[in-house]
Amino acid sequence: MHDALYREVGKRVKTAREAAKLTQESLANRLALKRTSVTNIESGRQKLLVHTLVQLADALQVPIETLVPPPGDSSRDLGALLKQRPQDEQAWVRAVLSSSSEK
């Protein structure tokens, strides 16, 4: 279930990176990551923390919603994943996503 979400996010990161005409290396440098980490994110092999997702959106100069699949398919539904986390974590994620979309 979660693997499908990470694969979809990875595809969206790759699409946004290519649209921005960035190499994996240049994106990695912007994020203080190794190129292999960007490769793993794009392939869905590397799990993302919320703050990394926010940093990716900032580095790619796209709204965070561009990188997150829309609700509907439970295998891709960020809301369904959030419901599995403790209430304080849910509130923090919503606050981060809200502040990111206000930019």
Image (cartoon, grey):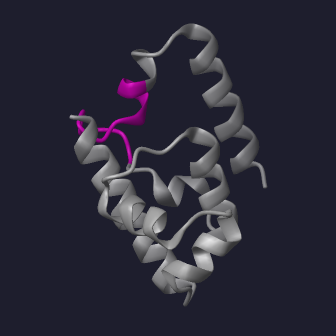
For the N terminus, the quadrant is: top left
Can you give x and y, in whole percent of width and height, for residue 91 in the image? 64, 19
Q: Is residue 57 visible?
A: yes
Side (left or right) of 24 relative to 97? left
Q: Residue furthest top?
A: 87
Magenta stretch: dominant secondary structure: loop
* 49 or 15, nearer to the observer: 49
Check residue 91 for magenta coloring.
Answer: no
Is 74 part of what is drawn in magenta?
yes
What residue sits 64% from the left and 43% below the top? 51
Which quadrant does the C terminus fall into? bottom right
Residue at the (47%, 84%) spot, across then down: 18
Total of numbered circles in the picture? 0
Q: Is residue 62 above or below residue 83?
A: below
- When asked about the image quadrant of residue 57, the answer is bottom right
- Residue drawn at x 50%, y 79% as measured from the top left: 24
Quarter of the image for residue 26 reads bottom right
Judge from the rendering whether residue 95 lies leftward or rightward of residue 45; answer left or right: right
Residue at the spot 55% in from the left edge and 80% down from the top edge: 25
Res 40 quadrant in image? bottom left
Measuring from the top left, give residue 12's x and y in whole percent: 40, 65
| 102 displayed left or right of 70 | right
In the displayed structure image, the side of residue 75 where residue 25 appears, left or right: right
Does the image show residue 61? no
98, above or below 59, in the image: above
Q: Which residues are magenta?
A: 70-81
Q: Position of residue 88 (x, y in %)?
A: 63, 11
Q: Identify whether 1 is placed above or below 27.
A: above
Q: Is residue 50 above or below residue 62?
A: above
